Image: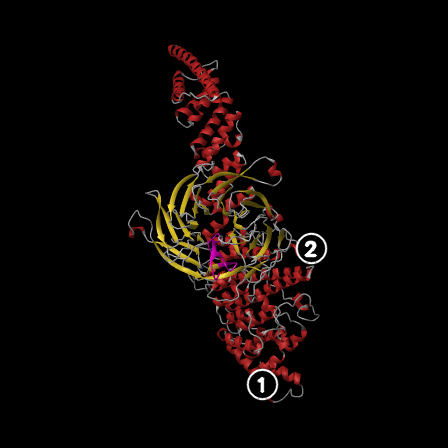
Amino acid sequence: MGFHQFGQACLELLTLDDLPTLLIPGVNSKKHQMCFDWGPGEMLVCETSFNKKEKSEMVPSCPFIYIIRKDVDVYSQVLRKLFNESHGIFVGLQRIEEELTGKSRKSQLVRVSKNYRSVIRACMEEMHQVAIAAKDPASGRQFSSQVSILSAMELIWNLCEILFIEVAPAGPLLLHLLDWVRLHVCEVDSLSADVLGSENPSKHESFWNLPGNTQTLTELELKWQHWHEECERYLQDCTFASNPHLESLCKIMLGDEAALLEQKELLSNWYHFLVTRLLYSNPTVKPIDLQYYAQSSLDLFLGGESSPEPLDNILMAAFEFDIHQVIKECSIALSNWWFVAHLTDLLDHCKLLQSHNLYFGSNMREFLLLEYASGLFAHPSLWQLGVDYFDYCPELGRVSLELHIERIPLNTEQKALKVLRICEQRQMTEQVRSICKILAMKAVRNNRLGSALSWSIRAKDAAFATLVSDRFLRDYCERGCFSDLDLIDNLGPAMMLSDRLTFLGKYREFHRVYGEKRFADAASLLLSLMTSQIAPRSFWMTLLTDALPLLEQKQVIFSAEQTYELMQCLEDLTSGKPVHGGSDTQQCQDDDIETTKVEMLRLALARNLARAIVREGSLEGS
Amino acid sequence: MFVARSIAADHKDLIHDVSFDFHGRRMATCSSDQSVKVWDKSESGDWHCTASWKTHSGSVWRVTWAHPEFGQVLASCSFDRTAAVWEEIVGESNDKLRGQSHWVKRTTLVDSRTSVTDVKFAPKHMGLMLATCSADGIVRIYEAPDVMNLSQWSLQHEISCKLSCSCISWNPSSSRAHSPMIAVGSDDSSPNAMAKVQIFEYNENTRKYAKAETLMTVTDPVHDIAFAPNLGRSFHILAIATKDVRIFTLKPVRKELTSSGGPTKFELHIVAQFDNHNSQVWRVSWNITGTVLASSGDDGCVRLWKANYMDNWKCTGILKGNGSPVNGSSQQGNSNPSLGSNIPSLQNSLNGSSAGRYFFPPLDSPRAGSRWSSYAQLLPPPPLPPLVEHSCDADTANLQYPHPRRRYLSRPLNPLPENEGV
């Protein structure tokens, strides 16, 4: 995880003087400008000089084009696991039944929160291993800083879980906070455990045990008060005066701040101090009072030596129960959208967010989820996780998905089918059409007619199906045979997409029927192609030529009536043609061939008509 | 943000425009050296120049890709008063073997009598159309009626803007409620304070473009203009590069309130205005979802602008040259993300100066008996959730995707093939 990403300062009205700045090596911003372009996941940047009126100093100082990526974390091998596994938790959370109320709902949400945290921890540990194994110190440092960030994420999340999701009441609240500190402050060695009883389970567990809630909070407070007074008495009686260590211990047990701060080096940070202090001074602290203790602990601990840092501010905002501030500060401090998007979504499921409506009706949860999902779409395969996040953004999720998914490069058929499936499941008809059209166009350009035809059928693109059918027919006219027979023979209802495609299918059917020697069927099909006007005029001569062998068969195939119709077709075709008087020899030759063809057809038709009349007459007579 | 790669462009003069194709796997560059180059991204993520050819007899200002539904088509415009349409030919020639592709000129659009300053393809739902604008103040709209025959382009409309034109932008909305619309900017710098942005709308009845709006408040030269992707909104968002960056919304006034048949009237609002570039702004462009606007200005920076969920626009990032000379190698995969951010981050606060504020001390200073040594004894994490059911199939193509961090991993740790679990 790097530092701040662009786009993250946008959450609020923060006016930051120091904006995330990417320095581009080799570009001189003092002398030149930059031209750029957005891509789906990347940006192009190149040095240029826009002021065209000034004659350029020719040879540009920087002949480089830079590819800029937004979210470095998306490309991290270890964080990939975080993205993958949290995706499953996210989807599960969206499906938590709304009807669940009260305790069962709360326990479910707490479980979800713990699952998210366990994923962060697993990721953190893996990152730690990677950091240890890193060969050069620079990358080692880089990985270990990522461990730190993951650790901070978990720390914040855990506190939010205690305060906002568990909503632990006075009493159990401190128990949770003790666990929180224990989990995150790694100073669990025996020394500190001895000095700070907070780290010794045997000491407090028996004390804090509330079996079956038989002990009420008041009873507990009474008992504690009693113990506290006893300690105080010992101190006043100077019982431990002979031993400064024991005295200090006693003071600590009374929650004496000065005594605690003397042990500052054992307390790794102010919130460790806070929890320790609460344990000995106010174990039944109410949630509402936390912020006062937190603030004073922070002030006392830092003692004016240093100022609070982003993590301090985030934790403080949590102690103040200012969820909005927590999310805001996290958005600024963390380098990716993963954390804020998932935490905000969870808190929203806890019904904790009042919506901050966008002018087009989206809220903060959706805003953050959209950012996160858009980041995933910059990655060549993580985009598939992004789809589900968009699905759960009711306002702009769908339109964002539409804009993103159509940009997925369709470099393999497999990938194209995957993208199509996603679009089809969501009835994104325009995207389906467009993707199929792109693939159809690509296939045509590569002269893969079968593929082009099936994509245009899937795109339901009649015009393109017509175009591809024409290519098929042209190929047939040139070569005398069809390619992609499987496809054309099995068009089924898809044939109806365009007239030309219908014709292609029917024409191929004619060839099949003819091949099966079902001459009568073939003949009537052929004729119907012309009389029903399905066949384009330009193809009639080919059809009539196809009729020739049928006319020449021994038995009569075309009836007299059919023959008349064929003659009509031939005359329609020839009468419309202007007589060429051109000097073009090629044209003359073509015309000659055409004329010969027409003559042959007329002869064949006349002979067939004669035979048909004789045959039909004799049949009627008999 | 980080520089993922730098590529030696190898143009012999200034590059005026860079352009990604629809999927971001190809790019085109154009230059004062009168040529256009096309670059393709290989499966391994490297960029290779696959074509470079002389396109014009003057500086080439802009190059742009048609939607891939229309094939592999480019348009360019130039100081030589022409715009041209180019198509990639799939051939069985030797070119393919050498990894080169072949582009042929399909048409030259010669109607302009002055430098053609911008060229833009119309949104794909309008068919294969393109608009040009020129210094003579005329926007021309051309159409290729047969998408399989790109040598036939007919001049459909000529719109006179009366001012030297510098830039055009089509409204990308495909909503039936919105007629085709084009915004035109002028960089006329004569002292008269005329409005420099005009918006024209297509009228179905007259089949002509008519002026729908003039942005009276924009009186300084305009260098670029860009409608945002629509996202299903009823209104439009328009960004303008002039002496500052401006963002306008255009809300159509309901038809029944205007005289029927005439062009749509709009309620104009300026929603943002930024002078951070200090002087002229030259380019504005939206990301694909219209959530981030980038602008480039005389300060030599590209600035990124974004609205938060309360419609508050602000700068969210800067791309800036560091002024250092470029070193040799032609293509670098910069796997070490270097972000010059000085934002206080969590990491700073964790690895800050004050001792005892580490979650985990730096690796190079392990101390026995310290917190570090006990790191391994972290309390057991809460139980891992059951393995995530959802798993995406691998894209075989991605197996070789360059991983920014891979360089650091001399051997795979906890081997997680990139296709696993994703």
Residue A8, x across and y down, in percent: 51, 61
- The reply to whether label 2 and label 1 mark residues of one chain is no
Q: Tell me the residue at 59%/64% (across/down).
A: A149
Query: Can you tell which mark lies on residue A232?
Result: 1
Q: Kindly tell me whether residue B333 is visible in this rendering.
A: yes
Check the image and name the residue furthest to the right: B368
Q: Chain of mark 2?
A: B
Indicate the quadrant where residue A308 lies. bottom right
Closer to us: mark 2 or mark 1? 2
Query: Can you tell which mark lies on residue B410?
Result: 2
Check disc 2 and give the amino acid type: Ser
Residue A218, x across and y down, in percent: 50, 78
Q: How many marks?
A: 2
Indicate the quadrant where residue B158 lies. top left
Residue B308, x across and y down, in percent: 46, 61
Q: Tell me the residue at 49%/27% (across/down).
A: A508
User: Which region of the structure is painted magenta?
Assistant: B277-304
In the drawing, does residue A395 fall left or right of residue B318? left
**Marks 2 and 1 close (CB-CB < 8 Å):** no
Q: Is residue A68 above or below residue B376?
A: above
Q: Kindly tell me whether residue A284 is visible in this rendering.
A: no
Question: Foreground: A132 or A162?
Answer: A132
Around disc 2, counting alpha carbons within 10 Å, would you say few (fewer than 14), some (14 to 19), or many (20 or more)? few
Q: Chain of mark 1?
A: A
Question: Foreground: B371 or B262?
Answer: B262
Q: Is residue A87 above or below residue A183?
A: above
Check disc 1 and give the amino acid type: Glu
Q: Tell me the residue at 49%/23% (across/down).
A: A513
